[in-house]
Structures are given as structure tokens and as C-alpha cells.
Amino acid sequence: MPTSIVSSSGVSYHLWQLPELSSPEPSESIAFNTLRNDLGDGYRSQVLFGSNTGLRSWSLRLPTLASIDVLPNTVTGINGETVSREQYVWDLYCEQQVTGDPFVYTSPRNGQYYLVEFVDEKLTYEQARVKLYSTGLELRQVRISGETVFNVLATESQDSTIMTWLKGGDYNDGTSTWTAAYGASVSGNGDVDKETAIQNGLDIVRFSDTTNDGYVATGLGGLTVNDAFLVMKMRENTFSNNCGIFTGSAGSSQIILGSSGTTKFQNPSLTGYTYRKNGIEYAQTDLQAPMNTWAVVHVRYTTGWPLSGSDFQFGKDRNTAGTFAEMDLGEVIVYSGLQPTSNVREITEYLTTKWGIL
């Protein structure tokens, strides 16, 4: 197990080291900041304030001494030393209170990382031991502006696999290769370049800046696209052509296309299709694109876009002439299989936080 996790902005946070608790299972709770008004006769109104991913908390309890041989008596401490479990909790609590820095906890429910802090404002060594083995230690999620420790790989499951996860800083101008953080890498063709420290201090990939012929592609024939997230920006006020943002190289896999002379993506007219920009859902007749601004775009098609026998590509529409996109990409995550709604919200929050998108 690693002892630290590096955030999206490069800050290292300590990772909770106690083994997974099994007697009983850790209790995970979630709360949402809402304002609710009871209108009488069973009617009510409700407004959500803050994050639509909620705020989590955990109650942790280790097995009692009767099963102490099941778990190791010592763990790696916050400074790399070997300490008892009680000493570990004591040291971590004191460190968090002195520095004010949160630490990272891995949720046993979904394997996801969260920044957390202790709930107790005061803790004695004896209390640390009692809480550890009986009443439970309380942790609560915290957020830091511009920081995220979200683990993209934890979103993969048997029902939803990551086809590709691309990050702008991983594009190599020399070899024209965009090496994937996970899944399929893509190859650059024509005018495709990495630009450094463009959005929120992060590197991006720029398409068709000098000559109108840039795109990237890879071969993943036989798979189906269900969910795709793109951190992107169109570098024009209105679409100058029916450009391809994300498509297959042939067939009917037109996943995201620009609509010439408008500020919208083309209406796919599909049942089971959903489009969101920065978490806000738009009707198929009003797919507002991020023109000269950065946004997180999410498209979903429950049936899926088949890529049978073809590549998928970013920056042009299949093999259609004159359909190159003047756009920037910061990060791309593509899934075969549907992501749970809760994951969709957390992925969107991860990307908007990391890329400084309101």
C-alpha cells in the first residue's frame, strides 16, 4: 500500500494506513446541503446548495482483541516508521491538528480516494484506543479549492471499462504519440501539438492551430462507447464547419460533431442519449458547445456507439474532407459500458476541480 497520494496540483497527502476494517464493516454516510420547504398536505419544495456529489463521513472500528491475530499489530507511521495501530492514530491526529492538512482515506465501498479529517476536536490516547476498538473513529470528507485526489481507475468495473484515459501533458510532439494514462494510446496526425501551462497551469493538446489538418486516432475495433468525458475548448466563436470532435473513422460512429455557423453540437436524434456541459444537462436540440471557453463535456448513449472494425479519433469527422476541428483538449476519459450516475457526478467534479472550470 502506498503511504501518500499526490493531488491534481502536485501536493502529497498521507494515505490512511490501517487495514480494511471488517468487524463490522465501516459505516459510510453521505449528506447533501439542501433547503427544504414543507408546503403542507405532503407537498414540498427543495433546493440543493453546493456539490451534487454530497459530503461523506465514515465511522471506523477495528476488530476487537478476540480477533487481533487477523490483522497486523503494527503499521507504517506518518514518517515511515513502524508503530502500533494506537500510536498511528495518535500521531496522525496530532499531525492533522497541528498542520491543518487533511489526509486521504480509501472508501471500502467504491475504492475511491477522499480527503478527510478527524471529527473529534479533542482526543486522548486512551480515547484513541477505545474508539479504535469499540465506539468507532469518525472521519469526514473535506474539500480544498483546486485540489482533488480522485482516482479515475477506481471507476472501472466489470460493467464499465476504461477504453482510454488521456491527459494533455502526456502528448509527445517528437513522436506524435499521446500515451494513455490507462487504456489505448493515440497517434497524432497533421497539426497536433502540446502547449504547456495553458489551463489552470496544466498542459493541453492543440489541434489545427496553423494548418487545418490535425487529429489523433487509435484502433479499437469491436468495442462500444457508452460514456465519454472531454475537457475541451473550441477556439472559435461559432463553428466554421461541421467538424468532428469525437468520432469513429468510418461507419455511423458520429459521437460529437460541430454544427457549422452555430454554437451548438449537432443533434444526434438518438433515444437514450444525454449531453452535459459542466454537469448541466442540455436538450438534444440545444447542445451548447464550449466556444472559446473551457468546459467538461459529457456524452452518454445507453445503446452505445459501435466501433466495429474502425478507429476512434478526435479532431475530424471520420474520413470526411474539410471536417477538422480547431480545438484544445486537456483530458479525455472514454468508457465502454455505462457509469453509475454517482460516478458521473464525481468524474465531472474531479475534472472541473482539476482544470479550474467553474
Image: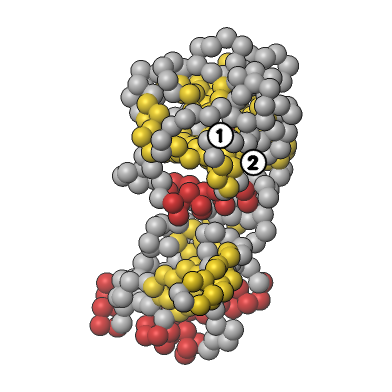
- Would you say residue 57 is visible in this rendering? no
Residue under the image location 44 percent in, 15 percent down: 250
Q: Position of residue 280 (x, y in %)?
A: 58, 47
Q: Dots 1 and 2: beta carbons under 8 Å? A: no
Q: Which mark is residue 295?
A: 2
Residue under the image location 46 percent in, 77 percent down: 41
- Would you say residue 41 is visible in this rendering? yes
Amino acid type, residue under disc 1 in the picture: Thr
Residue under the image location 45 percent in, 74 percent down: 42
Determine whether the residue tagged by mark 2 lies in a helix, strand or loop. Answer: strand
Rendering quarter of residue 244: top right
Which callout, 1 or 2, points at the residue further toward the start of the chain?
Answer: 1
Q: Is residue 27 left or right of residue 125?
A: left
Q: CA distance from mark 1 to mark 2?
A: 19 Å
Q: Position of residue 149 (x, y in %)?
A: 55, 55
Amino acid type, residue under disc 2 in the picture: Ala
Q: Which mark is residue 285?
A: 1
